[in-house]
Image: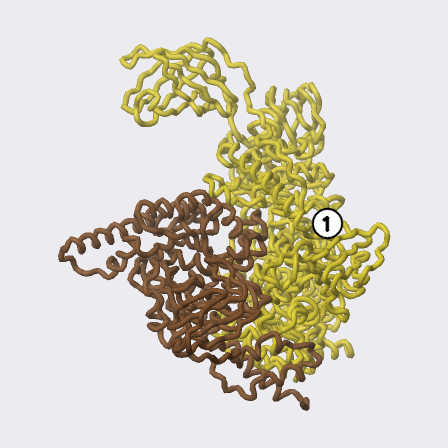
Amino acid sequence: MLGFTLFLTAGVEAQQATRTQPVTGIRDNGTGFHALVGARVVTSPGQVLENATIVVRDGLIQSVGRNDQPPAGARVWDLAGLTVYPGFIDAHADLGMDNVPEGGDVGPTHWNPQVRAWFSTTMNFEDDEDRRSALRSQGFGTALAVPKQGIFRGTASVVNLTDDGVRDRILRPDLVHSIGFQRSFQLGGAYPNSPMGVAALMKQTFMDTDWYMRAWEAYEASGRAFLPPETSASLAALEEVVQGNQPMFFETNSEEEYLRAYALAADYRVTPWFRGSGQEYRIVDVLEGRTEPLVIPLDFPDAPDVDNPERALNASLAQLRHWYLAPTSPGQLSGAGVRFAITTDGLSSLNEFLPNLRIAVARGLPADDALAALTTTPADWLGIDRTHGTIEAGKVANLVVSEGDLFNEEATVRDVWVQGKVYGVTRPAQVDPRGTWLIASDDEWGFEAELRLEGPLNRLGGHIDVTDGERIDLSSASVVAETGRIEVRFDGEDLGYEGTALLAGSVAGDEFFGWTSLPNGADPSFQGTRTQAFEGAARGTVAMNVPEIDLPFIRPMMEYGRSSIPEQPPAVVVRNATVWTQGTQGRLENADLLVRAGQVAEVGIDLDAPSGAVEIDATGKHVTPGLIDVHIHAGVSGVNESGFAIVPEVQMGDVVTHNNIWMYRQLAGGLTTAHVKHGSANPIGGENVFVKMRWGSLPEDLKLENAPRTVKFALGENPKRRQGRYPDTRMGTQEIIRDHFMAARDYEREWQRWEANGEGIPPRRDLRMEAILDILNQELLISSHGYRADEFLALIRLAEEFGFRVQTLQHGVEAYKIASELAASGVAAAVWSDWGAFKLEAYDATVYNARILMEAGVVTSLHSDDNQISTRMNWEAGKLLRTGLTEEQALSTVTNQSAQAVAIDDQVGSLEPGKDGDFVIWSGNPLSQFTRAEQTWIDGRRYFSLEEDAAQREEIERERTQLIQAVLSVEGRSGR
Amino acid sequence: MNTTKRGTMTGVLARAGTMATLTVISAVVAPLLPSSATAQVRMTVPPQSQPIALQGATIHTVTNGVIENGTILFNNGVITAIGTDVQLPAGTRVVDASGKHIYPGLIDAYSTVGISEIGSVDVSSDTNELGDFNPNVRAEVAVNAESRHIGTTRSAGVLVSLTTPGGGLISGMSSALNLEGWSWEEMSLESAAALNVNWPNPNPRRGGRGGGRGGGAGDAPTYEERVQELKDFFAEARAYRDAVAAGEGVRSDSRYAAMIPALNGEIPVVVAADGAAQINDAITWGQGEGVRIVIRGGRDAIHVADRLVSENIPVILTSTMAAPGRAYEGYDGAYSMPARLYEAGVKFAISGGAGALYTNRLPWEAGVAVAFGLPEEEAVKAVTINAAEFMGLDDRVGSLEAGKQATLLITTGNPLDMTTNIEQAYIQGRELDMNDIQKHFFEKYMVKVRQLRPVVF
């Protein structure tokens, strides 16, 4: 379907009294008075008028009614057999206002080039003509034009999609601010370069806007008695947003970004709108009942590549499920009563829009809901419902004229009317060439044959039966609309020639005159007569084109996802096990563990359990506390924010991901709690987060409640190896940390001074400085990466100089060299069991590290810093046995000492009354290489067991097999 | 006959020296520490000079079952007798090993110990020579006998390493090394034990092209081109061999000359291949070349198991502790691979996998398979006799048999489990100094801990 240029000018022209621009030359005034008669008119979702007449005058709908006589003087458009819908509205359209000036933005905008809130799509209106025309071809007459550059992107405006001048196209200027989680590389700037950095920048900018208002207020109120605050067009532009008066449109690219955006908006009292990701089907339960505008794309994924057996082996259930389920997302939202609009945004080609829309309908989206999502719903949210969204008298004449049912058939858009102007999209077919034709040629290439043309008009096919029994397959044929000519190409091999043969013909009634062009240069012409007409629908219908597969809801939507969170029985008692309490009770043989309401109640011999308790016979088994890894990077969407050397304002808690197969593997290895760290690119990195392996929960529910706050520091090679960024040496690392400590104290003093006397510009809340103050006050505990003894000693002494204590050293390959100093300063150590020599600063590694530290009285934990090793921390502890530690001492480095090292020992790390009911049942001694975890419990809920695991593998196998078959059954792998 | 108990280090490090509780550590541990840190990091000991008999141990021969309360006698580096009733020649030094276990020294079939020292320090690595075809390079000549990793590897019970070059299509020759000796020459057990080939990747990510060379995507050779390069090289080498054999006066070519033992089936061709298609194509190629191949890697070996069995092609697994390759495989995808291959009848060895720095993790790589279904004795075979057999060393090492080298371990149990200790090792009858850099640091810094601790004894 090709758009073509306007084929007539009709509709409103300049009205003399309400226009500013003088007319040059002769005025061009059509009547703007039309009557569209005979169509089936869908006036609004669910409302249909058969054989209706729509009268359009001066861009507005004057009347709409069944069988109305067209008024005298109106140009009459015969739309018999056609369907008319209200013009579509795209509530998040990318119209291409993307140009960034060379050299970047000028003027006092914002120090960070990614903060472009000053940008206005109204004031910088420059839409792309091709995109506009392509949008119209898909039925759209109105769009919210959103800017796409930067994190804070500026304001979006509602515009009509006519070809009029810019001053006639703006319906609602600068209605809503636009914001996204991806930075634009074109805009430059080093910071932020991570998702948590983006979140931090968003928070700081919201807070800065608040300050900006107060600062200028104070300045004006003082009678301009001091130097003014800085000027920032971006902060000024955000004032209405932070006051909740102007919405912020978050563009999200995953269901997790949606959750993140929602939380941010709530925290900063911003009124959020959301552009969805197409992954909404994963969080329908969350979306249910929410009323914020949600605009979803129809970007359905291509099928995974299963072209050969090895590629099929590599197709994950996550990919396969996403391919299968993404098209059901709109239908699922609809079914759950979630109100949403649909956008073309996110499609690689706008021509995919209507086909994808029909797939969404075929996969469960009621057509009326689809229409509402394109008309009444966006009109409502964009505040244009008085004028747009339905076909009613008095509304703007935005109409989609289609040949058939746009939602259920392969219908083509004929025309789109925007504000009473008609834009042609496709021209009607003048002839229907389908049927059986006898064709014959009497020239030198003479032949006789039967030509059969069949199928829907937009996908004509057929064949030629030559008299000698040969059949030529015509897989594709097209009708050139206005001339009634049909054109076919086919493989010449059917006629014995190598190459492609062409056939064209003109149809007039039941007569056919045709000619061919054969690969050998011959071009016989022929004539034909229709002997039989084709009986069949003119248009293909759209049906579900994938087999029905039972795919129950799971979270996360991948291998081993759960249908729900495991139950928490009121009481659980594990009997007759070797119980390693890792607390004062030590290790007990033939003992019982009682967990009540998710917490450890008692460990002892022959415990009385409340009636109804879940009883587990663990004879011959070992039971330990859930294991703890105090240093991993799995389970977050980003690791390093390296845009600045000092970034304690970024928070890993913002980017926790639940779509994380490692969590399941960790559970399977008995890990229940982890300290998820920021990366090591910065002397002062970001704030870390504690998670529990509550597989099947959403990110927020994975976080350990009431956990202490910790921050990543990094010393040695990593923070200094980033080129062109201070520091380059361990000396510089020490100094930049010290300088920031001092800066935070200065910041504190500025606040104190202002709070005391209120003079001058009020200070701003600086998240970075606040975080450093928290560090100095030991509310944000240091967890520092490093290898060598010297660098650790330097940090510890620096902290002591500022009157506080470093909580934990991490990696600490040379921690043993300063074991006594660590003990004296009360610094804990988290070390590897046997890592070493992978870099120069790790060369003096020794597996005795932990033992020496423990001998000196240092609280000592192991850690993995590795996805896979975090799944077997019991064996990491086991490696210490050969250094002479007792078994309980060895296990303590992944349980109670780990908890102590990061100050979570009030909650986890041992099986003592009041602690969380996190425990593991092992097949034998957990420190033996020959032992495996059989069950893993968190909060008194069984999150892993070998039996469930086995059952899930069978289910995964079934689903993968069926989904791979489904991919193979769908032609062309588009799956749509 | 003088009966000795192995002394100094074991005394410090055995379970007897564990920290009883943290509160009384000073009293318990301190007296066990050496009075000063003058110990050598690792001393090389002289060749065996008198017969040695280890008595009273449970002897795990690997090839001929387990002998309870047995004696193993060795002289001049070679085992002369094993049994419960062994006659000891005059002058035999008898070591009381009662209650202990004796295993053959473990063999890592794929390591870079000796030729790679510090991971991110390029100049400390001699693994990868420039270019695609380096059959003539032999690992042993680059082995640093003083490498820190040699000591820690031995402490883990690994006494023989197949140190192996990497990179290109033909990486070079693995050298079999005894991990004891003053120089690589003394350590060498087999100079060119196996030829190493890296099979190209037939399923590169979409958008890229095949190969194995990396670099710019535009002009990178396809998978088919890479395979053809390999075939051409073998064809040229064969032609060279035949021309030399026919007495033609061809100009010498060290690369083709180095290929001859592999072409003649005297040494194996170890082909690195992980994916199912890779393994299949490598087998097809190996048959065409008529060489004896061993698959190294074998991540997808289970998908090719029937063919590996019917063609009798062994596999050296490199990643039994790796992450599962695919999310649906299960958390134990790699852990359970040996057991599944065993069920299927595939012959396999297990290697350290993680490279030079972690050859000392070899026992765990095999031990994990036991937790996930592999019989214990099969796990031991995978790091002893199987590795020896695939690499053509089974006439010398890999099991405890009369006539084989006395390369063995005295342990408190299965050396593949963390709950046991390795107390003493012998390589060719030499009673090793069991110290290593890590123990050295332990001793040295425990001195510091004691010096700085304000306690009175």
Chain B drawing hue:
brown
Q: Nearer the viewer, residue A74 or A730?
A: A730
Q: Position of residue A21 (x, y in %)?
A: 58, 44
Q: Secondary structure at mark 1?
A: loop
As drawn, is B346 to the left or to the right of A49? left
> What residue does disc 1 label?
A565
Place of residue A671 in the rendered image (x, y in percent of width and height, measured from the top left): 66, 60
Foreground of the two, B368 or A36:
B368
Q: Where on the picture, by quarter, is residue B122?
A: bottom left
Q: Position of residue A672 (x, y in %)?
A: 68, 59
Question: Which colour assignment does the render follow?
Answer: by chain
Question: Which chain is tinted yellow?
Answer: A
Q: Is residue A509 above or below residue A235?
A: above
- The answer to whether residue A247 is visible is no
The amino acid sitting under disc 1 is: Ile
Question: x, y (%) of residue A769?
Answer: 66, 73
Please report, as a chain letter, where disc 1 is located: A
The quarter in which the C terminus of chain A is drawn is top right
Residue placed most toward the observer, A572 or A350: A572
Q: Nearer the viewer, residue B202 or B183?
A: B183
Work out whether residue A820 can be spotted. yes
